[in-house]
Amino acid sequence: MGLGGVGIDGTYPEVSKDLMLSKLSVLKDQFIENYNPDINVRVDRIKRLQLLVEENMDSFHKALQSDFGSRHEQMSLLSDTLPVINNAKDALKNIHKWMKPEKRKPNFPLGLLGAKAYIQFQPYGVVGIISPWNFPLILSIAPLVEVLAAGNNAMMKLSEFVPATSELTEELISKYFNEKEVVVINGGPKTSQEFSGLPFDHLLFTGSTAVARKVALSAAENLVPLTLELGGKSPSIISQNAKIKKTVDQIMTGKLLNSGQICISPDYVFAPSDKVSEFVEHAKNHVSERYPTIKNNPDYTSIIHLNHYDRLNNLINDAREKGAEIIEINPANEDLSQQQYHKIAPTLVLNPTDDMKIMQEEIFGPLLPVKTYDKFTEVISYVNKLPKALALYYFGNEKSEIDELLNKTSSGQIAINDLISQFAMHDLPFGGVGPSGMGSYHGYDGFKNFSHKRAVLKGQNLLDAAKLITAPFNEKTEKNIRNLT
C-alpha cells in the first residue's frame, strides 16, 4: 500500500503534512538540480505517461466501474483513458514548437540598434494537482501531460471517492515514474485541505466553486499561483428556428453522459414557450431509444455515492414542493427505490423558479430544468444576472442571436450547435471565468499556463543609449526622451 492507501473499512487514512512536505522537498530539490529540463527529458516523461495508460486500460476501466458501481467500459474509454492518450500524442507532436521562444519587438530605437526581445517559457517548478472523482483520469493525468511538457515536476492529490482508481493510479505512477518526478498522494478530506496549503510553485484545482474558495485561501498563505477549473450553471439555449429533434438529441446526449456528472454538462435549458411540449416529447423518445431500461442497464452510469444520490433527490423534492412539474423519464417503469446502484432516472423539471435549489446549485446529475422565454432579450438578461458559467450552448442559426451571445454575455466557453465537444479540442483552451474558474489548459494553452513567461531582452552594442537620457538633463536629453515614445 502506498501513501494514504485504502484502509480495511474502505476509507483513506489521512496523510501527515510532514510526510507531504518531505515528498515535495524531494521534488523541489530534483527540479533545482535539473532546472529547465531539455526536450528529450520532457518527451520521455510524456511517452511514459502515455504508456502508463495504454498498457493498463483494462485495469483502469475495471477500477472505474468498481468505483461508480455501474459505468460502462466504453464510457471510461471515451471520457477517461483515450483522451489522456490523445493529449499525450498531441503534446509529443507539438512540443518542439511549443518550447520555441516567442519573439517580441523591442521599442524604437532599441530594435533599430540591434536589441532583441523574446519570451522564454520556463517551468514553474513543482505543480500540485487536485483532481475530482467524476473523470478521475482526464482531470488528473491529462493535465499532467501539459505539466510535464512545460518541464515541471508534479504532486497529485486524487479523489477519495474513487478509491480503486486512485489506488491504481498511485501504484502505476510509482512504477512508471520515480519520486523525484511525480508523486501521488491519496488521503481523506484533511489531507486535501493540507495539500492545498503546501508551498507549490503552481496549483491546479478542479472541483466546486465552494471548495475552490477554501483552496484559494490555503494557497494564499504561500502566494501560490492558481488554476481553478470549476463549474456553475451552464445554460443550453434553443432558438425558435432550431431543429428541435436534433437539438434535443444533442442536449440529452450531453446531459446523460456520465449521468450528468460533468462540469460542462447542460445545467438548464432555455426553450421558446411554444416548444416545451415538443422538447419533452423528444426527450422521452431519446431516453426510450438509448436507455430502454435504467436499473440494471450497464450503459447508464450510477451516481457516484449515496450522499450525492440523496442530494439530487432532495433537489427534485424541493422543486416539486415549490410548484415545479416533475417528469421522470423511466421507459420500463422500474422501481428505482430498491437497487444495487445509486441510479436516478432522467428527470425534467418544468416551470422552475429561482427560489428552487435546483436553480441555485450546480446540479451534477441527470436532472434538467427547462425554462421558457418569449423574447430573446429575456435570455440575455437572465444569463447575465447569474454568475458566469463554465459553458454556454446555443442551438439555432439566427445570426443576431449568436452575435448577442458572443458580444453581450460571458462564459468560459461557448458552443454553437454542439455540446461538450469543445472540451475535446486540443487547440482550444479549457477553463472558466470568474466563479467558474481562472486560468485554462489544453494543448499549447496548457503548456503556457504551466510555464512562467519570462521576459528576455538582449541589449544592443551599437550605442550606449543610457547616456542619451541621463543627467545632466538639458534640451538634448529632453529631445531624446521624447523620441523614445
Image (tube, rainbow, N blue to C red):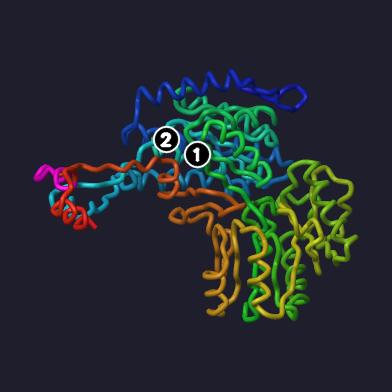
Number of numbered discs on residues:
2
342 displayed left or right of 420? right
Query: Is 464 a magenta residue?
Result: yes
Residue 405 x/y as whole percent:
56, 70
Residue that protrudes farthest toward the left in the picture:
462
Residue 445 in the image, given as x and y percentages of width and height = 43, 50
Give the residues drawn in magenta, as a range: 461-469
Quadrant for the C terminus, please: bottom left
The residue lying toward the viewer, choosing from 78 and 114, is 114
In which quadrant of the rendered view does residue 210 lie?
Answer: top right
Secondary structure, mark 1, is loop
The answer to whether residue 281 is above or below residue 300 is: below
Q: Nearer the viewer, residue 474 or 140?
A: 474
Q: Which residue is mark 1?
A: 225
Residue 415 higher or lower than 194, as above or below: below
Residue located at (77% from left, 71% from top): 280
- How crowded pointer 2 is (Cα within 10 Å; few <14, some 14-19, many 20+) is rated as many
Query: What residue is drawn where x is 41% and y is 22%?
Result: 30
Earlier in the chain: of badge 1 and badge 2, it is 2
- Residue labelled with disc 2: 124
The spot of residue 131 in percent (x, y) is 60, 39
How far apart marks 1 and 2 lie (CA) works out to: 10 Å
Query: Which percent across, then down, holds residue 26?
Result: 47, 20
User: Which kind of residue does numbered mark 1 sit on?
Assistant: Pro
Q: Residues within 10 Å of mark 1 (few under 14, many from 20)?
A: some
Q: Are marks 1 and 2 in contact (CB under 8 Å)?
A: yes
Q: Quadrant of the N terminus?
A: top right
